[in-house]
Structure formats: C-alpha cells, structure tokens
Amino acid sequence: MPDRIIVSLDMMGGSNAPGCTVEGAVIALKKNPKLHLLLHGDSDILSPFMQQFAPFAGRYELLHAATVVADDEQPVRALKYGKESSMRKTIDSVKSGAAHACVSSGNTGALMVMAKMVLGDLPGIKRPAIIAALPNPHGKSVVLDLGANTECDEFNLFQFALMGNAYAKIILNKASPTVGLLNVGVESIKGTSLQKKTHELLTNSDLNYKGYVEGCDIAKGVVDVVVIDGFTGNVMLKFGEGIIKLVIDIVRSSFKTNFMTKMAGLVMRKYLRSSLATIDPKSLNGAMFVGVNGVVVKSHGSSDGLAVSSAVSVAYELAAQDINQEIKSELKAMHAESSAQLLVEKIKKTFGMGS
Amino acid sequence: MPDRIIVSLDMMGGSNAPGCTVEGAVIALKKNPKLHLLLHGDSDILSPFMQQFAPFAGRYELLHAATVVADDEQPVRALKYGKESSMRKTIDSVKSGAAHACVSSGNTGALMVMAKMVLGDLPGIKRPAIIAALPNPHGKSVVLDLGANTECDEFNLFQFALMGNAYAKIILNKASPTVGLLNVGVESIKGTSLQKKTHELLTNSDLNYKGYVEGCDIAKGVVDVVVIDGFTGNVMLKFGEGIIKLVIDIVRSSFKTNFMTKMAGLVMRKYLRSSLATIDPKSLNGAMFVGVNGVVVKSHGSSDGLAVSSAVSVAYELAAQDINQEIKSELKAMHAESSAQLLVEKIKKTFGMGS
C-alpha cells in the first residue's frame, strides 16, 4: 500500500452538492489519515466552504472546474460539451495519474460514458458494470449490475459474472466465489430467454456457478456473486434502500410509544445504531464501475455528507488494494484477458449460438 | 356482502404443504367467522390432519384431488395433464360458482395459465398481472406486475396501469389514484426503450399519471399505483422480503446483547411485534391475479401457516368487495371495457406506433 492514497472528488455532483461533498470530504479526511483529496468544482461556489478544510492542510487541493453536468443531461452530450465540468476533471485526474481513484455523485449515465471514453475498458470487457458488496448474516455478497446497463444480452451478463468473480476473490477474499444468476425462481423453467441463455453460458464456464437465485437469496447470502441486468439491479437496490428506511422508521417510532418504551430506547440506542450501521444505505454508499480501466466510484445522487464519505472510503480501499490490477490478473488467469470476449465467442461457437 | 364467503384452497400447493395449508386454513377460519372453505387435495394425505377442522364443522368441505402440480412443471403441461390436480380443482370451484375466490401456493406459472384458460380474462385484458398492496408510512400503494409476465411490451404495461388504477380506487378507496412507472431514475432520459414507450402511452392517457418513479419511492408512497414488468417486480419484491427479514433479525439480536438490552426487549416485544406486523411478508402474503375473470390469489411458494392464512384473508376480502365486478365497471367507465385493447389501438394510431 502506498504512503498516501489520492482520491479525486467531484464536488458539484449530486442533488445536495456542494454541501454534502464538502461534509463528506471532511469526514473522510478525518477517518483515513493516508487519504489525500483532489477537489474538483467551481472555486467561487466552493470558497465559502474551504475554511472547513483548514485542519487538513497539505492533504487536499482545490481544482477549479467551470461547469457542472446536469442530472438530466444526455450522457453523449455531457461527453461532448462537458470537458470543463467537475465530473470530467475528476475522471481526468485518474487518467493523468494524479489520483488513484475518483468519486462522483452526479449523473450516472454521463459518469459511465465519460469514464469509459477517458479511461478505456479493462482488456476484453465490453460493458463495465456497477458493482457493490451487500450485507448478509455471514458477511457480504457482491451484486452487479446495479444500474450501468439498462439493456443487456447474455454475453454482457456472462462478462459481469467474470468480473464479479474476480472482484469477489479480492474484496471478499474467497478462493472460489460461488456465482448465481438472479431470476424469478430457481427451477430451470423460470425466467426470460435472457436468463436461460445466460444460464447456459455460465453452466458451461469454469466459474463456480450455482444456478439461479431469487431476490430473497441475496440477503441470505446464498452465493458470493449475484449477476443481474442493470435495470432490475437498480430498481431492486433502490427498493431495498426504501424498505430499510421504512423498517428503521417503524422501529424508531415504536420506541416513542410511552414512558417505558422511551426508557428502553435509551438503553438500546447505541446498540441499535452500531448494528443497523451494517445495513444503513448511507454507510454502504459507493459502488465501483467495474470493467473501466481506472477506479471510478459512483455515489448515490441524493447522498448526504455521511454517504459521500462512505463512497470516498470505498474508493480509498479499492485503490489501496490496487483492485484493477488484481482484476486484470484474474481475467488473465481465466484466459479471458486477451479478450473475455474471445471466451464468449468460443462458447458461442461450441453451442452454435448467435449473438 | 353475502352471508358467507366461500374460498377454495389448494391444500397441496407450496413447499410446506399440506402442513402449512392445514394450519393456514384453521387460522383463517378462526379469524373470519363468515369464511367457508373448500379444501382441495389428496384425501389420504389430508385425513390425518382433518381432526384440526373439528371446531369448524359445517364451514369446510374436503374435496379429493388425485394429483399435484409440481413446482418445476411446465405451465402448458400442467394445463394439459393436470385436470385432476388440486390446483385445477381449486380454480374449477370458482368457475362453477361453488366458490367466490380461490388461493394456491403452488407453481405460479401453472396457476396463471390454468386461471386464464379456465376462467378467461376480464373484457379487453390481454395479460393478467399479479398485484399486491405494499405498505408505506401513509398507508399502502398497489404494485403490479409482481411476477406473472416476465417479458412485457408497452401495451401490457399500459393495461397494468389501467387495472392498477381500478384496483386502487376500490382497495385504497382513492377517487383518482396517482400512477407511476418504475424506472432507474425520474429524468426523461432514463430507462429502457420499453420505459420510454410506456411513458408516452401513459402521458397521453386519462390516468392521473405522475411519470417515472424509482424503487425507493415505493416505500415512501410517492404514488398509489406502481407499474413494472413481472420480472423486475418479482425480483424486487423478493429482495425486499429478504431485506425485511435481515433488518428484523439484526434488531432482534441487538436485544440479546446484555442484561439491560434483554430487559428493554421485554418492554418492547409487544409494541415491536404489532408495529412490524404491518411490513411482515407473512402478514402481507397473498397477491391477486388481476385481469382474470375470477378472484385467484397467489400465495408465496414457501408460505407457512400464518402466510397461508393471510392469503386466504386477502381472497376473502377481495371476494367480499366483489372486486372483479368493480374493476369491470371501472374499465367500462374508462371506455376500456369493450376492449382495453381498443384504447391501446387508438393511442397506437394517434402516435403512429407499431406493436
């Protein structure tokens, strides 16, 4: 691990920016002594906030960016006209080697397209995906795609499995991660034609593939890697976030019922806070664009300061582990490096499948 | 409301049958004094359980069914060869008028195909959908499709919106339910081509359409009716169920930390039990096949007794409200009765869209 990890942060991305990004940056700097930040954003807008960084002199740099990518901007337009945007500058810092990793809470589609075009893909990877580790009673499982690709084919999903496998080996420290394909049931008759075609590819691969899994299997930790298209993955993840908030609100208001329950609440406060932190969407914020040749972490668009700090910590950890170098080695070990696509082509030929 | 509501129950469906169906039937009979049950299943297998029904003499009838539809049976095979199955007999009771509604925890695909073929569709409805009311802080929202149709086009989704609107008027008692289309973001650039085409149909309809909603908006209750394809809906719902269980387990184990927290647990037990019941997947079990010309309620395949009793209660309530008659009136009022498809055709022509 290097002496310092430099993370490039888009200060203007997200609906609560720059308040949340300033707060998040400060929390992350406090938490990670080796962290250095490159703060990209409009210096006029950011200057009133800069006094908050005083305790961290020498560990941050403010870099002016004249424009901001809007949330409803078409990704291709953002790529073309957003060269001076805080998002683009944030990614450029990784490209130039000035930063080890970058974080943005801005427009997901624009971030993905910019990251792909500026940094390129990992060898053989056709479509990068959003990956995150979600909690279960025994630890975590990694799930992808959580929203980068709303429309996928079986070869995309197959590559997600390859990348998920490599990511899980490193992040979950598993020698042979189990892989599952998300479906509406575990029986072979279940699902769409996309599920069936992907199931065939995975069954005939060298992955430790366990077949179909259902939505409820994720929180049970039935497999280490869960593969799904980005539309379903995104809707599902956000539904889960909403549910967690609803349940916690219900628990919280139960403690407000009467004097005795309020006393019980005083006893429970610190225990519940620490145990529920493991599933708090804010603490879990920050998902990597796996497959891009550089560490790019997407933070939730509605992040607050705590959530931004979590995403910065994710970027910090991934950079500290040199995640992409490890993923490249894994893909190479699976003979997928020269082209993961080649592996797919081989399977296609074997099974006489069209794309 | 009639003097008695007769529900037909598939005693052999679900992975815990017949233990769960017997227990569920008994709980439901205790809870609903006007409930009568037609119990369909293998009488040899069920006879050891029948003493449990002794307190309810005159309120149930055991009807022998020789076979069971397996969970991995192809729906079309089940339709062809399953005429003597408990599932088919359960549906036949609704067709003949012997029962007001029916419930099965068996193979979803087979149940849908049988229900559609035996009972037919509501006028103009092309694809029935699975609908359920999910909790939010202000009440409930209805969500469909939760798993009947894994592949949908924009006209299917449009019809789901029409049916969801009618269902919400009755079940949520709203004069003009708000309708949202589930997507990966609320901006118009977001989502797949299916989302965009459906958005256009809904925007130009008479529904109180509010545009795109995200997964997290369901638990917030942002709209009354949420429309989604059955693949995403099913994965999302089951993911949410897994998450609820995970959160509740975390809360429960926090109370086991030490003596003080155990005392707090004694105080909180009854309050938490009653408040968490509103989001307990078992209490929420039971989702209607809306669009079928008869009340058919799907219960979760892994249901236990409590969950089966919830599904029977859902069927009971829907039958008591004569839900399908109300939905037919609503569709008629929207000029959709002669054919909801006609409405779709009209919009198709107006926008020069192919199907």
Image: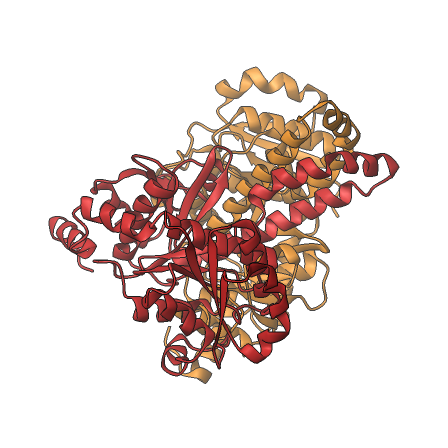
Chain colours: A red, B orange
> Residue A181: x, y in percent?
35, 45
* Image: A300 above or below B287: below
> Residue B175: x, y in percent?
72, 67
* Image: B82 above or below B137: above
Classify the position of the C terminus of chain B by image quarter: bottom left
Front residue of this view, candidates A115 and A130: A115
Front residue of this view, candidates A29 and B43: A29
* Left or right, B137 with reference to A1: right
Residue, far right: A259
Question: Which residue is pictured at 86% across the width and 39% down the height?
Answer: A258
Front residue of this view, candidates B157 and B50: B157
- Note whether residue B186 is visible: yes
* Image: B324 above or below B348: above
* Left or right, A151 with reference to A276: left
> Picture quarter containing residue A52?
bottom right
Number of marks present in the image shown: 0
- Note whether residue B328 is visible: no
> Residue A200: x, y in percent?
24, 45
> Residue A176: x, y in percent?
29, 35
